[in-house]
Structures are given as C-alpha cells and as structure tokens.
Amino acid sequence: MSQPHPRLEIRNLRRSFDGRAVVDDVSLKIMPGQVTCLLGPSGCGKSTTLRMIAGVEMQDSGEIRVDGNLICDTVFRVPPERREIGLMFQDFALFPHLSVADNVSFGLKSGTRAGKRERVEELLERVDLLRFIDGYPHQLSGGEQQRVALARALAPRPRIMLMDEPFSGLDNRLRDGIRDETLTILKEQDTAVLLVTHEPEEAMRMADEIALMRDGKIVQQGAPYNVYTRPVDRAAVAFFSDANVLRAEVSGALAQTPFGRFLAPGVPDGTAVSIVFRPQHVRIDFDRGGQGPKPTASDGTAARAIVQRARFMGNESLVEFVMDYDGSVLRATVPNVFLPQPGTVMWLTIRRDRCFVFAA
Ligand SMILES: Nc1ncnc2c1ncn2[C@@H]1O[C@H](COP(=O)(O)OP(=O)(O)OP(=O)(O)O)[C@@H](O)[C@H]1O
Ligand SMILES: [Mg+2]
C-alpha cells in the first residue's frame, strides 16, 4: 500500500537576497491535522519560507506540493489566490469598511447567507467576540482585531494554514485560551499547520513537530520532547533554556572535569569538548564540615561553589554560583523557594544523564 501524501510538502527550497542565502535548502512534510512549528531566532528565514509557500515570494529553487500535487517550482506556479492556503501573518489587516461579521465571512465563497452567518457566529463565539459581530474594526482593541483576523483565517476551513506569530499581540492571560481554541479548531478541520514562532514555550505547547531553524537551515526536526532532550548542538540547548557550559579535553573517550569524568564515546583524544547542561539538572547540597556529598555513579563528584545571588522566579528559584575551581559562574534552578544568602558555601553536582557533550 502506498503511503498517504503529506498535505504540504516543500522540497529543497532556496531563496537568496543580495547573494546571501536566507532560506537554504529547506525541506518539510506536514500531514493533515499536524501542527509543525518553525522555531528560530529573528532573521533566520522563517517568514521568507512561509511567504514562498503562500506564493507571495518566489523561490530560487525547490518545489512545493499539496496532497502530492505540484503547486510551485521554478517553472510552474499556481498563483497565491488559487492555492487555498489560509494565512495569518504578523501584519494582519482587517477591512476597515467591513463589519466584523463581513470581515470573518470574507473568505467564505460558497454556501447560503444563513449558512455563512452561522459559521461566522460559531467562530466569533469561539474566539470570544460574538458581542462585536456587528461592530467595526476601529471599535476593537488591537488584540480583539487580531482575534477577528484569526476567525477570518479559520472560517473557510483551509486545508493548509500558515501562521506567522499569530498570537504575538495578545496578553498572556488571553493568549493561552486563544491558542488552545485555535488549535482545537484546526485539528477538527484536519488542517495541516505551519506555525512560525521564536518562542520555545509556544512551540512546545502547540507543536506536534518542531523544526528548529538557524541561518536559513533546518538544523533539527522532531517531536518537542526529542528536540528538547536530544539537542543537536549547544545552540539548540540554549534555544530552549538557559544552559551551563563546561570545557574539557577528551582522553580515552572520557572528558575530565571538576564534576568527575563524562563519557565522550568516539571522540578522539585531545579533542576539546563542551559539556552542556540545563540549570534544572544541577543538584545543590549544603556544606558539611568542609565536605560535599559523596560521589555517586549518577551524579559524579561534587564541586565547591559560593552563592553569588539568588532570585525568586515564581515557580522556581534561580541561584547563581561562583565555582571554586576557576571562578566561573554556573546557574541552578530549584523548584519553589530557595534563597540562600550570598557567600554561602555549597556543593554542586550535575545529573550526568542530562548532560550533552559536543565538540567545542
Ligand atoms: N525582500 C527582501 N529583500 C532583502 N532581504 C530580505 C527580504 N526579505 C527578507 N530579507 C532578509 O532575509 C532574512 C530573513 O528574513 P525573515 O523575515 O524570513 O526572518 P524571520 O526568521 O521571519 O525573522 P523574525 O523572527 O524577525 O520575523 C533577514 O535578514 C531579512 O533582512
Ligand atoms: Mg518573521
């Protein structure tokens, strides 16, 4: 039996501006009902990728397919308005002279007047704006306008939805609700979604799959859990959370550090490596008569550290330490409240199974 076609597939997409590759050989497949987040820092080429799929930007090479059918390569090109792709961009604009209801029903081509009205009411209800149905855009706040634009994009039940930071203008309290509701609607419709964001929390919350983009390339792709727990490099760790880094040299497939030895399988002797770990994987122990805890297989050796400062962050506390062995600073987070006085001597160990060893 043949595999079903992806709803959206892009193959080897490239685009340069002024000789600089902004999108550099990007390939992606998204199945119906799947949400893929394109996650990456500002300027890495996320919007340009979306614009090519939408058809408002032309690629230099590569192709785009919908349900297996070619919609664009360097020769053949379905115009944007015939791609039936839903769009929700950063700079969304409502039609100022149309009512909220008419804005939302704008993309509804078929159906009776009553049927369209019903769909508009349903969507406005779901984004919590039904009371504004007969209002006009200028009577709404920026966040409310954004939700109308979202309803407008969802209304025609597009097969594919491209979203570029669609929730950026909403306050935190509203955002979670609108995000979840949008996701529910898109899943119900079996829409394939490509969502651009530079916020890792948003990607973790929304995505079935994350495509991590940097300098025009997709550097890693997979389920959020896999991308978070098996990052490809140091920057991929640092993109999701604060990261501590130790430098070491490899000898006999082991990297020697003040926290004990770390496995570096297959790394040649003399190679410099970075051992990268997140603050939540640092264990803190009190000093007992000048001693730290005994070394264990899972946590290795404890290293002596002095508290530099401690901050309460709400769900956790962030403690910064100056390390005795070289004066470097390491950060640790602890659930709830833990605010030791600056100058306190403590001992740190690292969860070895949560460390990543990369060539430096
Ligand atoms: N029409 C253009 N002409 C020249 N350079 C462009 C053009 N469009 C985009 N660029 C450049 O391409 C790079 C990628 O832009 P893009 O808008 O895709 O980034 P992004 O990942 O969406 O960033 P952000 O998160 O800030 O929105 C940027 O350096 C940008 O200046
Ligand atoms: Mg952008």
Image (cartoon, helix red, strand yellow):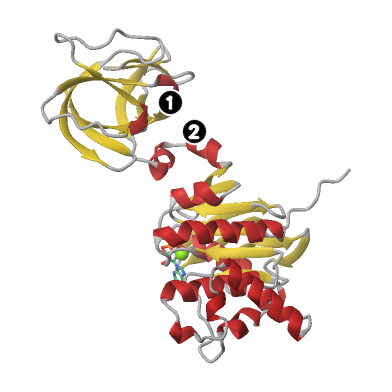
What SS does tag 2 mark?
Answer: helix
Other-residue count near label 1 (Cα within 10 Å), few / some / many at <14 / 14–19 / ≥20: some
Other-residue count near label 2 (Cα within 10 Å), few / some / many at <14 / 14–19 / ≥20: few
What SS does tag 1 mark?
Answer: helix
Residue 108 visible at all = no
Residue 209 visible at all = yes
Depth order, front residue of 193/269? 193
Residue 227 place in picture, x, y as percent = 52, 39
Q: Earlier in the sequence, mark 1 or mark 2?
A: 2
Residue 333, compared with residue 47, is above or below; it is above
Q: Which quadrant does the N terminus fall into?
A: top right
Q: Which residue is mark 1?
A: 354
Q: Which residue is mark 2?
A: 229
Residue 98 place in picture, x, y as percent = 56, 89
Residue 266 place in picture, x, y as percent = 49, 19
Q: Residue placed farthest to the right in the image?
A: 1
Q: Amino acid at mark 2?
A: Thr
Q: Amino acid at mark 1?
A: Arg
